[in-house]
Amino acid sequence: MAAPNGWQSSSSRPLAVVTGASSGIGLELARQFAEHDFDLLIAAEDDAIEDAAEELRASGGQVRAAQVDLATNEGVDELYRTIEELGRPVDAIALNAGVGVNGEFIATDLEAQMRLIGLNVTGVVRLSHYILRDMVARGEGRVLYTASIAADMPGTYSATYNASKAFDHLFAEALREELKDTGITVTSLQPGPTDTNFFDRSGATQQNTKVATGKKDDPADVAKEGFEALMKGKDHVVAGSLKNKVQDTMAQVMTEPAKAKMHSKQSKPGTGKRES
């Protein structure tokens, strides 16, 4: 099958795939790959993915955009077909696409919760199976999963989000051990609150929480730490501020009920205090 849009399958650059790359951490991860001489396939569901691709082409590498809904099986399959059409092995992939839902679980929209699971969990598993199967056959590859420090605690008022990120983190750690003799490295990226559109997309109640209105990390800094950890083959990295690292350490010794109570103080709707 011919490669689309003039894509040169004979490029000497390695190929990286980044999901959720139209903005935020995903876009900054794509920038990291571009700045380190990777060609790119970037994916997201929104129109901004084309603008991101145009911007990234300034690095001098090839950039292909795929506007796909990775919360659905059809969207994941479409992305994988695009990968096959490029005629290039995937040297690295950053599975970064994700979404949150905030609020009391029984009061939130069920379809929004199921879509979160589709994007953060089901889509990640499906795409991982396709990509890792190919990497194992080739005997090399690097995989980065964007989890969160939220993976370390019960997510009171963000119950499905924290559970999904715990899944992503534990999934990554398990795959790392399974694949340790295959030439493939797996890394889990655990950022804390980051200055992206995540909180806006999580719903109106999320925007008025202590965590949403507090200080956040620069997504460029988070992506840089994630990229460096990936290239060094680390198992995980808690990225961003010292506060994130302290919280991650505390989470290892606190009880689950204590962590759930602490999370409630950060994520309960109405706890935010915006500066006037």
Image (cartoon, helix red, strand yellow):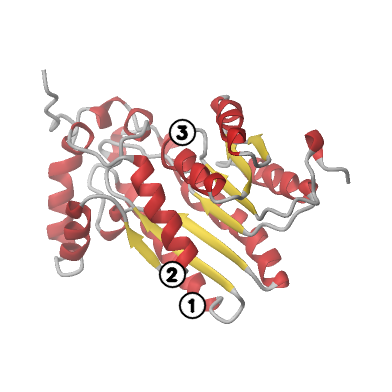
Image x and y of residue 173, in percent: 43, 69
Disc 2 element:
helix
Determine whether label 2 and label 3 are within 8 Å by CB: no
Q: As drawn, is 33 to the left or to the right of 131?
A: left
Residue 216 vs residue 123, the one in the foreground: 216
Which residue is the site of mark 2?
173
> Pointer 1: residues within 10 angstroms few (<14), some, or many (20+)?
few
Q: As drawn, is 127 to the left or to the right of 78?
A: left
> Residue 82's image quarter?
top right
Q: Answer with mark 3 or mark 1, whichever residue precedes in sequence.
A: 3
Q: Against 274, is 84 above or below?
A: below
Image x and y of residue 200, in percent: 34, 28
**Mark 2 against mark 3, which lies toward the viewer?**
3
> Pointer 2: residues within 10 angstroms few (<14), some, or many (20+)?
some
Image x and y of residue 246, in percent: 16, 59
Q: Amino acid at mark 1?
A: Glu
Q: Residue at x 52, y 43 (%)?
A: 30
- The circle on residue 23 is 3
Which residue is the site of mark 1?
177
